[in-house]
Image (cartoon, helix red, strand yellow):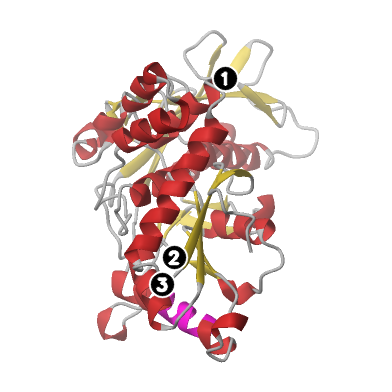
Amino acid sequence: MKARGGRALRSGWTTGTCSAAAAKAAALALLSGEPARGVEVALPGKDGLWTQRVTFPVERCEQLKPGLWQAVVVKDAGDDPDVTHGAHLTASVSWRETGGAGQGAIRLAGARIELEGGEGVGVVTKPGLGLEIGAPAINPVPRAMIERALGEALDTLPGGAAVPGAAPGRVLRVVISVPGGEIMARKTTNRRLGILGGISILGTTGIVRPFSTASWRASVEQAVAVLAAQAGGDRAAMPPLVLCTGGRTEKGAMALLPGLPEVSFVEVGDFTGAALRKAVEHDVPQVVFVGMIGKLTKLAAGILMTHYTRSAVDTEVLADITLRATGDEALAARVSAANTARHAYEVWHEAAALGACGGALCDQVADVLGRFTEGRVRARAALVDFTGRNLVAASSDWHAT
């Protein structure tokens, strides 16, 4: 991606990737008795593959006391720095007896491992985040990255060798902390979301990709122009333009609409409005929007620039949709009080109203998109689950040609 002036923007690393590197360094030191100066970790890829690997310098790795090692990796967010740029992602690793406060021990390479949040890592206090209440705010992908890195550290032992320090009834305790994380979190939306006491350990790819509005918008507009050009400007021959919010939804959309050419699918990010204006300019007849509930809720509210720092999800929109779709005032009140759009989705699911309310949400999104183009583009919308692969609901004319 290019910034203004043509300079390439530099990618960075998520808090999840840095935590995994710190955990691996501390575990290697605990097992070998020697400080680690650098470590290599795997990044999650498509289709469950972990083929990309990255090497990190270790800022500090020391034994705090016999049997307790701590390692620090400094986060470099690249050219899209956020409040956690420069944060010291810290992992403390030790053996202890069972019965601690960790959330769900797992077994790796003959050792039981328990992951905890320490100083500066937030604690989940509200539903709707996909994490257990009371658990540290370490999201599923970073957790998997940390566990994988720990497994690699344990695999460095000679074949058949016992894990040093492992014994029946003992657990490898791993505590992730971020000194100053509570102060950093004041500049985020964590408190509003119910994450208290620190930052979240985040990331879905392990990489922080620089956000250049000019270049991304230009790429979206170019993709729409290419779709129109390949149809030779023939409106009748032009396939629908399928707008997807990210890589997961794009892959899911391709599975939902297998008959469309690859050129139809555009990873629109947050530039739905720009894509629609370009669709009108090129006389594109149909637009399909495929997304998860957060983005769809913003679109339903008429917000076409959906970047999370520029607009917030309004659960009142979802409450109104709930009442219209079900007539259930109590359910609408529960949705109105939801902590996040995901929480509202869970409330719908628990009430067996996900199909009806999701369909009504998609109808409202399709209406907003159609009105934005002043009726010149026929719009449809689909709600997918949080994997991006499964269709949950769609606008009422989804199957119409």
Count residues near mark 2 (Cα–Cα under 10 Å), then give few for <14, some for 14-19, many for 20+: many
Magenta stretch: give its range: 219-227
- Residue 376 numbered mark, or none: 3
* Mark 1 vs 3, N-terminal side: 1
Q: Position of residue 359 (x, y in %)?
A: 52, 41
Neighbor class of circle 1 (other Cα within 10 Å; few <14, some 14-19, many 20+) is: few
Of discs 3 and 2, which sits in the foreground?
Answer: 3
Q: Which residue is mark 2?
A: 268
| Identity of the residue furthest to the top in this view | 99
* SS for dot 2: loop
Residue 38 vertical placement versus 184 (above, below):
below
Residue under the image location 41 percent in, 48 percent down? 364
Q: Please identify the quadrant where the C terminus is shown.
A: bottom right
Q: Quadrant of residue 193?
A: top left
First in residue order: circle 1 vs circle 2? 1
Q: Quadrant of residue 108?
A: top right
Q: Amino acid at mark 1?
A: Gly
Ranked by sequence position, the earlier of labels 3 and 2 is: 2
Residue 187 screen position, x and y as percent: 19, 41
Q: Secondary structure at mark 3?
A: loop
Front one among 16 and 263: 263
For disc 1, the marked residue is 104
